[in-house]
Image (cartoon, rainbow, N blue to C red):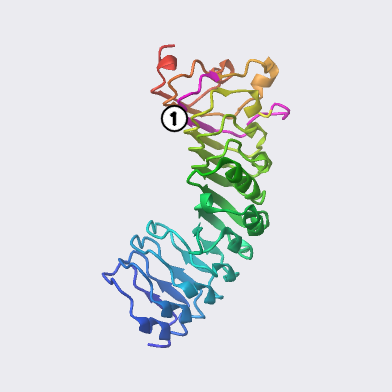
Amino acid sequence: MQCLRGLDLNHTSITRLPSAIGRLFHLRWLNLSGLNFVVLPDTICKLYNLLALKLHGCRRLRRLPRGLGKLINLRYLNIEETESLSVLPQGIGRLSNLRTLSKFCIGENGEGCNVGELKNLNHLRGHLEISGLEKVRDVNEVMEANLKNKEHLRSLDLAFSFGGQELITNVLEALQPHPNLEALLVYDYGGSILPSWMSLLTKMKDLKLLRCVNCKELPPLGKLPSLEKLLIGHLNNVKCVGVEFLGIESIVLFPKLKELTFRYMVEWENWDTTTITSAATRRTMPCLRSLSLYDCPKLKAIPEGLKQRPLEELIITRCPILEQQ
């Protein structure tokens, strides 16, 4: 069947692909989603005309073929829900036509690709997760990745696994995305300072900061004009959320924020906005509709200005001091 243009084996019981699949030279679209195999045959790299490769839900898949970079016409590579796939092969940076790459896993010690291979993938759009950032040993590789050039990305996950604070801080600072980004998740970041570029993402609608356990202060997120949802969790060293969080030089603080959630802030004691004038209080979070506080055992009070908001939802759970008020 060498004239095949599309082959769909989605969720069949196949556990191994034959090497003869490499003879389907005219194949444009290959769907292997949900299959129960560990590796792909290297001959798949002979499918030079392939445009789309779907591996969604291949949970046992451990590696991709080393020659994957030969598929220079590939535009769509779906590797979502492939938990066993921890690195991508070297040479993936040659796939300069890629539009969709759901995750980018960084290798180390000569195995797998480095973050610099993102350099030429400037057509990426939609969502991208970059994991293994704690493995980066040279900040120049991160700068080479040039996320600022990827104007079509709309959602970005930056996944660390802690690591040396000084280098990791520089790594995150060098990962500045294009200002068109609309959603950002940062988790397991071991640095003590969040990046300066975070307050420059003027189109950001959804922001999540999770398990940034060494950070003591929050950036001035009140400056973000488009932010609608904000989730902050497991920032275990934050004791006070003050006016620096609001970005008080802005005319309106958090002008479009609708949902604000804090989770597992075990050392957080004070939510201080006392230095804000009454006029500024009226301009703080004017669109807020949902406020959720989970597992903040030391938090003493909610700012008076927020109590006056016409909230549609207020959740206070495992915050013993607040629950007694």
Residue at (67% x, 48% y) in the render: 179
Percent from the top left, x then y, of residue 149?
A: 68, 57
Percent from the top left, x then y, of residue 100?
A: 53, 63
Position above or below: 144 against 66: above
Quick one: 223 or 186, which is closer to the camera? 186
**Quarter the N terminus occupies:** bottom left
**Quarter the C terminus occupies:** top left
Tell me which secondary structure the magenta stretch mostly adopts.
Answer: loop
* Residue at the front extreme, as displayed: 109
Quick one: 106 or 231, which is closer to the camera? 106
Residue at (58% x, 71% y) in the render: 94
Residue at (30% x, 66% y) in the render: 36
Position above or below: 1 against 91: below
Residue 221 lies in quadrant: top right
Quick one: 301 or 234, which is closer to the camera? 234
Viewed as shown, does residue 224 lie left or right of 23?
A: right
Viewed as shown, does residue 281 lie left or right of 321?
A: right
Residue 72 seen from this side: yes
- Element marked by disc 1: loop
Judge whether residue 257 is colored magenta. Answer: yes
Position above or below: 49 against 92: below
Q: How many residues crowd mark 1 within 10 Å: few (<14), some (14–19), many (20+)?
A: many
Residue 151 seen from this side: no
Residue at (33% x, 80% y) in the render: 18
* Residue at the bottom extreme, as displayed: 2
**Bounds of the magenta segment:** 248-270
* Residue at the left extreme, as displayed: 13
Position above or below: 122 against 20: above
Percent from the top left, x then y, of residue 161?
A: 47, 46
The amino acid beneath tag 1 is: Tyr
Q: Which residue is mark 1?
A: 264
Judge whether residue 222 is colored magenta. Answer: no
